[in-house]
Amino acid sequence: MDRKAQALVDGARLLAADYGFRSALSSDDADTIESVLANHGARIGATKAALLATDFQLRSTTTAQPRDLVPVAARLAAQAAVSGQASAIALLAGRPHQAVLVPVKAPVVIGWVLMAFPLEAQLAADMHSLSGLNLTLMSRAAPGGRATHRAGL
């Protein structure tokens, strides 16, 4: 999982370092920002991508349900503020995703890129072949309650 997270972080960093993307950010061209997020995200397998401001508020997103990303962004922001990047497993649109958050620098931080990648059945199969264990993801349905979630795995 750590190697996969690092590969996803590296993919998101490529976008964050892209000169054209940083130029679009500087010009505040919302259409171009969204297009670059969508195109780069699709190339590396992200189904959700977003640009966050330096205060971690959503600026632009490729998803039709941007409010789904708000709690994920908040959770990742706390980790990124300390370590400079973040990754976590999160439910988005009812499916488990591995989400990563990396800074966009020019040369100081001018924003953050959030990308989310669906966890596929192959991950569970790989984990099973390595450890002999089955994978079950749990999510909190409500404070104190739990619900088992197996969608896609």
Image (cartoon, grey):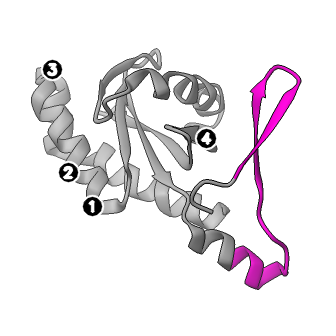
Badge number at residue 90: 4
x, y (%) of residue 79?
Answer: 65, 32
Query: What residue would you read off at disc 1?
Result: 43
* Kind of residue at badge 1: Arg
The segment highlighted magenta reads 126-149
Near-viewer residue (121 or 13): 121
* Kind of residue at badge 3: Asp
Near-viewer residue (120 or 107): 120
* Kind of residue at badge 4: Ala
Query: What residue would you read off at disc 2?
Result: 39
x, y (%) of residue 42?
Answer: 28, 56
Near-viewer residue (142 or 78): 142
Query: Which residue shows up at 20% across the image and 27% down it?
Result: 25
Q: Mark 3 or mark 1, which has the lower sequence index?
A: 3
Query: Which residue shows up at 46% across the image and 15% down it?
Result: 55
Q: CA distance from mark 3 to mark 1?
A: 23 Å
**Circles 3 and 1 in contact, beta carbons < 8 Å:** no
**Circles 2 and 1 in contact, beta carbons < 8 Å:** yes
Q: CA distance from mark 3 to mark 2?
A: 18 Å
Query: What residue would you read off at disc 3?
Result: 28
Q: CA distance from mark 2 to mark 1?
A: 6 Å
